[in-house]
Image: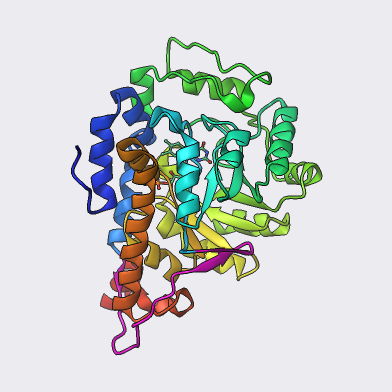
Amino acid sequence: MAAEPVNLNEFQELARLALPKMYYDFYAGGAEDEHTLKENVEAFHRITFRPRILVDVSRIDLSTTILDYKISAPIIIAPTALHKLANPEGEVATARAAASCNTIMVLSFTSSCSIEEVAASCNAVRFYQLYVFKKRDIAATLVQRAERNGFKALVLTADTPRLGRREADIKNKMITPQLKNLEGLLSTKVSSDTGSNLEAYAKETMDASLSWKDLEWLRSITKLPILIKGILTREDAIKAVEVGVAGIIVSNHGARQLDYSPATISALEEVVHAVKGRVPILMDGGVRRGTDVFKALALGAQAVLIGRPVVYGLAAKGEYGVRRVIEMLKDEFELTMALTGCPSVKHITRNHVRTEHERIHSML
Ligand SMILES: Cc1cc2nc3c(=O)[nH]c(=O)nc-3n(C[C@H](O)[C@H](O)[C@H](O)COP(=O)(O)O)c2cc1C
């Protein structure tokens, strides 16, 4: 039996041992030089704390509310593709773990399990992540199915007009399994001699013409609140607010799209300042420690999403592994709150952290 991990990073090695190389590489990899992949994690390391002492932290309340849903901690499950490659139960196991941790799961458009299977598996609060294909009626059908099956919000991933160049997948000739949600709507069978099948499939299907004006179309086909995922600049944050989104997710797609995009934790404050509290801001990318969750909240995020650690937990230990990943992150976050003098998430402020920029500025 594999050793019990003591932190999220240790799940990665367990996942590597558990998975065929093609699948592990698919989950772990980033775009091109993987510069942003490393930066997503390392930029957190350059932020330090300004902890406060002698605050009563005998009781810590981690809970928060996202779009009116109270969750046990500001830690949400990011949409990641193809969970059955990690575990035969796929997204059903992930959703059950989300339910038992009382948090939100964002189901990927490219999930292995269907919308209906995930909905029937448990009572987790679920959001549905959407890609828009050239065949727009596919998006409309899936959105209606998500709505009918009790999903509470849509997450439009907007940083994927084309698929980023993931070289491990190209080398491994990563195959796209048939997606259950698309059965009867679209075949995932493509073959490419030059790249990964995934890349070829995305090129064939993704609607690269999707633009801001299409938010109106999306709003016309659903009553669900829409969050937009993939914002990294103040310009796009302002546009998102103007078109009436219910929330913003600062994300670089786990560094799988445009290499040399900024680490998301470095881009967060720019977006926060532009939005001025008009809509909630979430972030993802490189969150591996409770201290990272705290740093994101101190810089203005309402919650973080975690991607790879969830899949690693699932690959290593199934539903239990996902639960452990979330619980560990929550425990570390709670400890960070105690040691910085914050009895609740409302007590976390900008003054509790010092960014690299501030450190350099203070030396001038
Ligand atoms: C294997 C994998 C698959 C992903 N699939 C999707 C997806 O289907 N839709 C989406 O919006 N984002 C997808 N993402 C991006 C995640 O939602 C999230 O932005 C990212 O994983 C966060 O970074 P982290 O992995 O460092 O936590 C995927 C990421 C990974 C690692």
Q: How is the image coloured?
A: rainbow
At 59% from the left edge and 65% from the top edge, which residue is drawn? Answer: 274
In this rendering, the answer to whether 26 lies above or below 5 is above
Answer with left or right where residue 350 lies relative to residue 328. right
Q: Position of residue 71 (x, y in %)?
A: 52, 62
Snapshot quadrant of residue 83: top left
Image coords of residue 305 (percent x, y): 46, 53
Above or below, 305 relative to 146: below
Q: Position of residue 166 (x, y in %)?
A: 39, 29
Between 10 and 29, the one lying in front of the other is 10
Tell me how many marks there are. Answer: 0
- Residue 8 in the magenta stretch? The answer is no
Name the one closer to the observer, 209 or 225.
225
Q: Is residue 36 visible?
A: no
Q: Position of residue 118 (x, y in %)?
A: 57, 38
Query: Which residue: 39% across, 31% down?
Result: 87
Q: Tell me what residue is drawn at x 60 percent, y 39 percent.
A: 120
Q: Quadrant of the N terminus?
A: top left
Decide if residue 49 is on the left or right side of residue 70: left
Q: Nearer the viewer, residue 108 or 353?
A: 108
- Quadrant of the drawing holding the C terminus: bottom left
Main secondary structure found in the magenta portion: loop
Outermost residue on the bottom side: it is 54
Q: Nearer the viewer, residue 120 or 173?
A: 120
Seen in the image, is 355 located left or right of residue 1?
right
Q: Quadrant of residue 182?
A: top right
Task: Give the magenta-colored segment's residue range.
Answer: 47-71
**Position of 141 relative to 302 (above/below):** above
**Which residue is drawn at the image coordinates 67% and 40% (left, top)?**
146
Question: Can the viewer see residue 13 in this picture?
Answer: yes
